Image (cartoon, grey):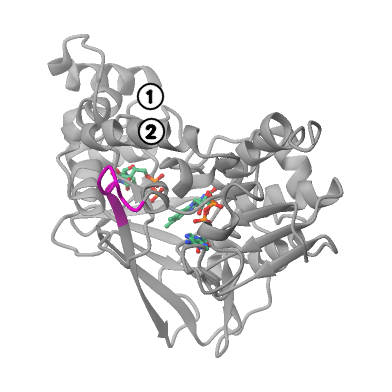
Amino acid sequence: MGADLVVVGAGLFGLTVAERMASAGRRVVVLDRRDHLGGNAWSEVEPTTGIEVHRYGAHLFHTSNERVWEYVNRFTSFTDYVHHVYTSHRGEVFPMPINLGTINQFFRSSHGPDAARALVAEQSAELDGKRPENLDEKGVSLIGRPLYEAFIRGYTAKQWQTDPRDLPASIISRLPVRFTYDNRYFNDTYEGLPTDGYAAWLTRMADHPNIEVRLSTDFFDDSHELSKDKVVGRVPVVYTGPLDRYFDHAEGRLTWRTLDFEQEIVETGDFQGTSVMNYADEDVPFTRILEFRHFHPERDLQTDRTVIVREFSRFADEGDEPYYPVNTASDREMLLRYRELAAAEPRVFFGGRLGTYQYLDMHMAIGSALSMVDNQLAGLWDEA
Ligand code: FAD
Ligand code: UDP
């Protein structure tokens, strides 16, 4: 079809843009180099157990954004799953994120909220009122040195392999710290998992007569008619692939972390009693074990086998999937130069996690796609 808009990447950002523009009467072609749509939120049913496995790591939907919640509910309902995480440290299991239960178990104490706050204040005194400027200082300021060393330092070393003083404080600000026994992982108003799975949700978003999805199609492969060389300047493009790749890494390579997932089917109905167990200590090589059956307790699953996935983190090489932007000071400088190049591209709009080199949760990717539609795309054809 003759497209009004080409969207590169069929992740949640690209699908949201495509769906909104298609509903507004535009013909949209969505390209993805993978053999499935949905980006990193994609899931598949493990055939021998019937258990839904999130192919690119556990994806928990949560948001406090009314508009995003209303929008996603057009394509799927959500279960009442509420996420909880536990962490294993020196052979003992503690609740996460850090809450009064974690604090009292760790210190073998029975502090109330005020006493626990006073303890943490005393144990973060080394900061001397200084505003925390990096992950290390932020971690100590939130929970004090002993808890930071037990639950954050080792896990962060495995996850990032970067000096925590070179990492932005925002990474750790994602985790709440609570002086109550509430150990819900997220603070958001709405939370749940798509009732009939991520694949069904994401497939429905693209199910529109004005949307054509072309899979296994790379934007930079010029053997097809919608490649970068043939499209840019002629048809508006929303690009959600890696920002540096678009410019052939002209300003250098932005650093990313990637993950290796080791899946195992275990002959038991329940391996760890919960969906996510983190491993805080550096002598355990993986960061966490996911057990997917626990994401859907409402499903009638067989009880003799279970699927677990161990997650290992490392720096992404060329050819690896980029998952987490590292965002060191030199990355941020390079990012500014790429942003200037991006602003000069004719009718190319950069969005999503890879296209903006930003950690975005699903609700943030959807929210920013809706804003791009309103503020940059909706009026594009008005002048024509
Ligand atoms: P993506 O989903 O990455 O989609 C980008 C797409 O572009 C990909 O499909 C890619 O194949 C395609 N592409 C790239 N280059 C090209 C090219 N040259 N040609 C064609 N196609 C191309 N969010 C939450 O809300 N909750 C969670 O619990 C959560 N857990 C996460 C766990 C992990 C391990 C990771 C990595 C992310 C997690 N997220 C979570 C974030 C979530 O995955 C993102 O918010 C979401 O994927 C963003 O969508 P996107 O469209 O920006 O990017
Ligand atoms: N983190 C940690 N210990 C934990 C969980 C998280 O140190 O048990 C730190 C770590 O640096 C991690 C960050 O907090 O990268 C954000 O955690 P989150 O669970 O949001 O990570 P994600 O699910 O995005 O991988």
Mark nearest the camera among 1 and 2 is: 2
Q: Is residue 81 visible?
A: no
Residue 187 drawn in magenta: no
What residue lies at 52% left-to-right and 71% top-to-bottom?
Answer: 34
Q: Is residue 32 left or right of residue 298?
A: left
Camera-nearest residue between 121 and 132: 132
Check disc 1 and report its element: helix, strand or loop.
loop
Per the picture, the main secondary structure of the magenta-coloured stretch is: loop
Whether tag 1 and tag 2 are in contact, CB under 8 A, the answer is yes
Could you classify mark 1 by the number of other residues whose Cα lies within 10 Å: few (under 14), some (14-19), or many (20 or more)?
A: few
For the magenta stretch, what is the residue range? Answer: 248-257
Q: Is residue 328 left or right of residue 96?
A: left
Q: Which residue is mark 1?
A: 112
Q: Which residue is mark 2?
A: 100
Q: Is residue 224 visible?
A: yes
Camera-nearest residue between 138 and 80: 138
